[in-house]
Image: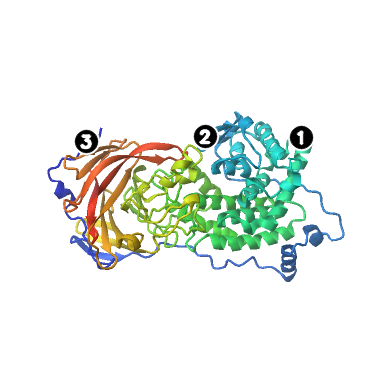
Amino acid sequence: MALPLDDSGADALVAGLPRAAPAALSDETAEDMTASEVLEPGRSLVLSDLAPPSLGAGERLIRLAYRLGVSSSTLTSPFNKPARTRLLATVKCPLQGDRAAGVALRAGHFLVHGVKAPIAQMDFSPSARLTPPFERMIHGFAWLGDLAASAPREQCAPTAERIVSAWLAQNGPNAKGGNRAAGKGPAWNVEHAGNRLLNWLVYAPLILSGQKEQLRGEVLAVAARTARWLDRNVTRADDGLGEVTGWCAITAAGLLLPEGKPRRLFGEAGLVRALGELVADDGGVLSRSPIAQMEAIALLVKLAACYRAAERDPPRAIDAMLHLLVPPLLALMHGDGGLGSWQGAGAVRVDRVAALIEASGVRTRPLKDIRQWGYQRLTGGKTILQVDAAPPPRARHARSGCASTLAFEMSCEGRRIIVNCGGAAFAGGQVPVRIEQGLRATAAHSTLALDNANSTAVLIGGKLGKGVEEVEVDRRLLELANGKASRLEASHDGYAARYGLVHRRILILRDDGSELRGEDLLVPAGKGKRGKIDFAIRFHIGLGIELGLSDDKKGAGLALPDGTYWQFRIASTSAEGELGIEESLWVDGQGRPQPIQQLVLQGMTSRGGGSFSWLLKKIG
C-alpha cells in the first residue's frame, strides 16, 4: 500500500516552485535559474513538392482522358477486346497483423478490441447494425492481415474463403438487390471500400489460391467493380484519411490489375493531392490522432509493397510522405514503446508500433517540438513528458476529437505515471459506446477544467465545437543553480469567452528526470470578474500505482509496482484547493478499460484569477 506523505517539511518540498506573473509568457519563473535559452524548433521534414508526378504530354493526356471517363481498355488497347480480369503480381507485404486476432479467426471468432464475435453469427448484410470497429473490420477486411500473420497460407486459406463467401453472399452481385445495391450501405463507405480493395490485392493468395474457381472469379469481378466505383466516388469520402485510403486502393488497382496504367496515373495524382491535404508540414495528420497517423503509415506501406510487386518505383512525393509521417509518431512513444493516449487513441501496444515502424523501413528520431501537430516532448534521464500544446482538430478533421489542450502524460523507465483515459476511438469494442463522449472530455485528461466544463465543446460523432482557438507556447532550456531543466509554458483561450479566464500551464522537468514542477494559472482575459468559480486539476495515475493521501490533503505518495516511490505535493499558497483521490479508468493497448485512480485538486477560485503550484518528485 502507498504510504501518505509526512506532513512535516511539506513546504520544503515545494520550495522554489516556479512563480509566473500573468503579464507575459516569456517572464522568468524561478529565482534559482542562472540562464535561459529559447530552444530551436524540432527538426522537421517538409515536402518541397506536392505536385503530381512529372509526366510527358502523352501520359498527361491519358490521365486527363481517364478522369473524364474514358475506359482503361480504350486508352491502352483501343483495337483489342478488354483484357480478362486477373492479378498481375503477388504482393509481399512487410506489415504484420495481429497474430492473436488471426488465431481467433481460425478458431471461428472475430476478435475486435478484445470482443469475440462468432463468424457463424455475424451479419454481413448492408442493413446490419454494427459498431464502428466491427464495421471497419468486416467491410474493410482488415482481418486478412491478422489471419496471414497467424499461420502458413495453406492453413489460413479455408478460413479466408469462408468469410469472403459469406460477405459476397450478402454484398456481391448475386446478393439480394444485386448490382442495384452497389454503392449502398456501410460496405460502400469510401474508406471501407478502399481498405477492402487494397487488402484483397495485398493478401490475394489467401482468397484466390483455393480450389473454388467460382469464388476466385467472383472476387476478381467485385474487385474490378470496386475499383471502378472508387474512380467515381473517391472524393466523397467522409474525411481526408478516408479519401487517402480510396486513392491508395485506386493506385494499387492500377498497378496490379490489367490495363491499369491510366488508373495508376489518375490514382497517383489524386493520392499526392489528398496526402497534402491530410498531413501538415511537420508530418502530423490534421486529426492529430496517433491512430490516424498509424493508419496513414500502414496505407503507404501496403502501397509501397504493391509498387515492388509491380516492379515500379513509387513517385518521390509518396516515398517522402512516408518518411515524413514516422518522426511525429515516434514523439508520442513512451519508454515502454507504446503510444500516449491522445485524441481518442488508447495506449497502443509496443509490438504494434514496432511492427509498423519496422515495416515502413524509416529509421529516424522522434520530433521534440511539433508545431502544427501540436505535441511537445520533453525528456530528462529516463523520464518522458508528452504535452498537448495546440488547439484540438477542426470538426472536418476530427474523428474522436478530444478537449485535451494542455494535458500531459509522463512516464519514467517505461512505467506510465501520469496518463489520460484515452480509448474513445475504441468505443464499440470493450469500451461501451455510451461512455465515448466522456472519454473525450477535458475531465478525462490530466489538465485543468473550469466549472466541470470542457475547454472545447465535445459533440456527437467524434466532432468538436467551439472552444480553444489559440495556444501560445514558449519552450526554454534552463540553467539552474543545481543542474539543467526543460521548461514549457503554454496557454489556451478555451475558457476566455465563457468565464473570462485564460488557462496557463508551466512545466519544468529536470534533466535527470527526477522532478517535475508545475504551475497552473488562471489569468483574466480582460477586466477581472467578481465572484468565484469551480476548478479541478486532474492527474490520472498509471495502472498499478498505489496512492496514499497525506493528512493535510496537500500531498500524496505514489508507490509504483517496480518498487520506486514518488511524492506529489501542492504548495501551501494554493489555499483554495483540496487534494483528493477519485476513481478513474484507462484504456490499454488492447482496447480494454482498466480501473485506475486519479489525484484531483479542486475547489473554488476567484474569477479574477488564481495560481496553483505543484511538484512531482522521485524519492526512491
Could you tell me if the residues under marks 3 and 1 are in contact, i.e. CB atoms within 8 Å? Answer: no
Question: In the rendered structure, which amino acid carries the disc numbered 2?
Answer: Val
Q: Relative to residue 511, is residue 338 depicted above or below? A: above
Residue 124 appearing in the image: yes
- Residue labelled with disc 2: 115
Q: Indicate the secondary structure of the residue bearing disc 1.
A: loop
Towards the viewer: 230 or 493: 493
Label 3 – label 1 distance at C-alpha: 66 Å
Q: Would you say 308 lies left or right of 424 here? A: right
Q: Would you say 64 lies left or right of 145 here? A: right
Point out which mark residue 238 bears: none
- Residue under the image location 40 percent in, 36 percent down: 594
Q: Indicate the secondary structure of the residue bearing disc 2.
A: strand
Q: Residues within 10 Å of mark 3 (few under 14, many from 20)?
A: some
Question: In the rendered structure, which amino acid carries the disc numbered 1?
Answer: Lys
**Position in image of residue 359 (x %, y %):** 55, 47
Q: Residues within 10 Å of mark 1 (few under 14, many from 20)?
A: few
Label 2 – label 1 distance at C-alpha: 31 Å
> Mark 2 or mark 3, which has the lower sequence index?
3
The quarter holding residue 596 reads top left
Point out which mark residue 212 bears: 1
Question: In which quadrant is the C terminus drawn?
Answer: top left
Q: Relative to residue 110, is residue 186 depicted above or below? A: below
Question: In the rendered structure, which amino acid carries the disc numbered 3?
Answer: Leu
**Position in image of residue 418 (x %, y %):** 33, 45
Point out which mark residue 3 bears: 3
The quarter holding residue 508 reads bottom left
Q: Give the label, 2 or 3, closer to the camera.
A: 2
Q: Give the label, 2 or 1, closer to the camera.
A: 2
Q: Residues within 10 Å of mark 2 (few under 14, many from 20)?
A: some
